[in-house]
Image (cartoon, helix red, strand yellow):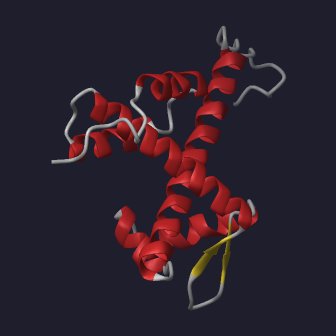
Amino acid sequence: MKPSPRSRPRRATPTGAGALARSHRATRAAHASELAEDYVEIIDDLIASRGEARVVDIAACLGVTHVTVSRTLTRLRRDGLVTTVPYRSVFLTPGGRALARACKRRHDLIVAFLRSLGISRPTARADAEGIEHHVSRETLRAFARATPSPRRRAPKR
């Protein structure tokens, strides 16, 4: 016979469980933000280079299925970053364009900073993809101060 729920001893909540839960919520929110930033950047790049951003092209850029892209676009629509037309292109809202431009500036700054350290262009670009979502504003300001301005940089050879 099973003991009734009232007669079972209560399990103790692990020490720090509340803080751990807050940390996990923050991590999930940060991941969702990273995903949104990656999508709006790619959509903006596709529109700039091809004149449109189609689900199939977004999927190819990210190496995911069209179903994954469709689900993410639903969230981005809900968040006011994109609009879609069935069986047509994906469009950025003004908020989506602003986010894409901010992400691009941040990405370009990180690439420039890494390049100023002597990192090759392909490696700097790849590393910037991994770094860009995890750098604080304070660190970005330091990168900007430490990076030569484009006007003062030596010409490419």
Relative image position of residue 137 (x, y in whole percent) = 60, 28
79 shown above or below 28: below
Numbered disc total: 0
Task: Identify which residue is drawn at 37% across, 35% down.
Answer: 152
30 shown above or below 157: above
Determine the residue located farthest toward the left in the rendered image: 157
76 shown above or below 136: below
Pick the residue in front: 14 or 53: 53
Relative image position of residue 84 (x, y in whole percent) = 65, 80
Pick the residue in front: 38 or 99: 99
Relative image position of residue 148 (x, y in whole percent) = 39, 30
Residue 96: quadrant of the picture: bottom right
Determine the residue located farthest toward the top in the rendered image: 15
- Side of 141 where 143 appears, left or right: left
Determine the residue located farthest toward the right in the rendered image: 6
Pick the residue in front: 81 or 102: 102
Task: Identify which residue is drawn at 61% across, 46% down.
Answer: 33
152 shown above or below 61: above
Pick the residue in front: 110 or 75: 110
